[in-house]
Amino acid sequence: MVRFGSSGWRGVIGREITFRKVRILTHSLVDSLRKSEQDRDLLFVIGYDTRMLSEKFASTAAEILTSRGQRVLLTARDIPTPVLAHAVREEKADAGLMFTGSHNPPEYNGVKLYTSDGIPAPESFTQPIEKSYLSLEKDWDDIFLPRADLLQEFNPKNSYLDRLQELIDWDIIRKAGLKLVVDPLYGSTREYLDHILLENHLDATLIHNARDPFFGGYAPNCSSENLARLREIMRREKAHLGLATDGDGDRFGILDQGARLCDSSHLIALILDYLVRRRDLHGAIGRSLATSRLIDAVAESYGLEILEGGIGFKHFGPLLNDGTLEFAGEESAGLAWARHLPERDGLLACLLTVEMVAREGKSLHAQLASLAERVGHYYFRRTQLPATEERRRLLGLRLEQEWKEIDGKKVRKVDRREGLKLVFDGDAWLLIREASTEPKIRLYAEGRSAAEMRELMHQAKRLFTNWRI
């Protein structure tokens, strides 16, 4: 079975992700698009990340597509996911396939689908593919004849970097004389993020910039633990900023001066504030329901509309593309600016952070302190638990339960769109949900003080240990 979650189809290689499933899925993609495109010839762009078998999965998909008479542009090497989204738009392709396990552990892989607009495929796009897959899976005849004349290898790097070159104020960055350390975590942004920094004559030290399908033995996410080496090199080099991206480059992690990790939700709010003040951002703002309301406070301080969406950028892509939103952010270090792409981009987030520090002449934590003084203090935390059957059962029971208060805190609103979200008086909230891309239960809490946030996180954990709460 193939199921598309908040960010594509993902699973363990050899168990959920197999070559047979990739072939059937690709065949289903063609069937779905041909129904809506009246049998015209289609163009597909295929990319892949650095993890095990990604390149072979990509080649397999290309073989199925060409065997169906479809034209394919296959990237010459691994690329970041936002580069694939950009290439789909540049090449005016009908769809894009990005083979990646994103920030999951090395044993995972999967595929993210993109529409012709370069946006993460919404449910209206993926549901017909899932249905077609189910109808084909049992009796699939795994015989096909690829056509080499329909396959073209291409390199989308220069076009993508040219766009970033236009978006960033490099003069102000060069004048600031910042020292940077760059950590792609053995992923696909190597020779992309470091390339554009060095091409602009910036002082950048590189680590973990070789291809490693096992990511040094860790999941390629920008957690504090995974950035230990970046922290060490920053301190040694006395660097101003440490810039990290996850395995496929659509998420980011930033270490401030002193090698302190910045909370991604708060940093997104700070970048939003910067873009409004310095870069003439004036459109509506989107954020996921699991993201800090500091973003709301910033938007409201400028009179900007704020829209709350579900988990995953597939909810924001269409709105960024049609002009409804100009900016969107999510708590898992996802940021998009419509002037660039209707999709999150960790490289853009890193470069905007560098520009912001260069122009303001202050550390990120100093800027965050000033922002909090202006719009209020918000304390956010996310953690996760293994998704055992017992915890899934308890979550199901919690979803059915009526909620009026927890330990004297009045529940103002209950949101069951993406799990269980309880909003309290004073805008504090907690959220419990099962991840759609890995077997985890995610817990989120935000309060207006650190003590309130810790208490809410404690309450969230108690929901899985004490039925009578």
Image: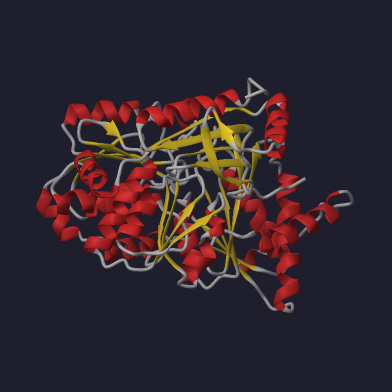
The residue lying toward the viewer, choosing from 27 and 2, is: 2
- In-image side of 35 versus 351 (left or right): right
Identify which residue is drawn at 15% across, 60% down.
Answer: 171
Instruction: Examine the rendered structure and indicate whether residue 396 appears above or below residue 56.
Output: above
| Number of numbered labels in the structure image | 0
Identify which residue is drawn at 76% across, 66% down.
Answer: 31
The residue lying toward the viewer, choosing from 246 and 376, is: 376
Residue furthest to the top in view is 465
On the question of residue 314 being in view, the answer is: yes
Instruction: Examine the rendered structure and indicate whether residue 120 appears above or below residue 18.
Output: below
Q: Position of residue 19 (x, y in %)?
A: 71, 45
- In-image side of 260 versus 208 (left or right): left
Q: Quadrant of the C terminus?
A: top right
**Which color scheme did the rendering employ for the protein?**
secondary structure
Q: Position of residue 445 (x, y in %)?
A: 47, 35
The residue lying toward the viewer, choosing from 72 and 404, is: 404
On the question of residue 221 being in view, the answer is: no
Identify which residue is drawn at 74% across, 79% down.
Answer: 38
Instruction: Examine the rendered structure and indicate whether residue 165 appears above or below residue 361.
Output: below
Instruction: Examine the rendered structure and indicate whether residue 392 appears above or below residue 437.
Output: above
Q: Quadrant of the N terminus?
A: top right
- In-image side of 403 versus 139 (left or right): left
| Residue 45, picture quadrant | bottom right
Q: Position of residue 256 (x, y in %)?
A: 24, 37
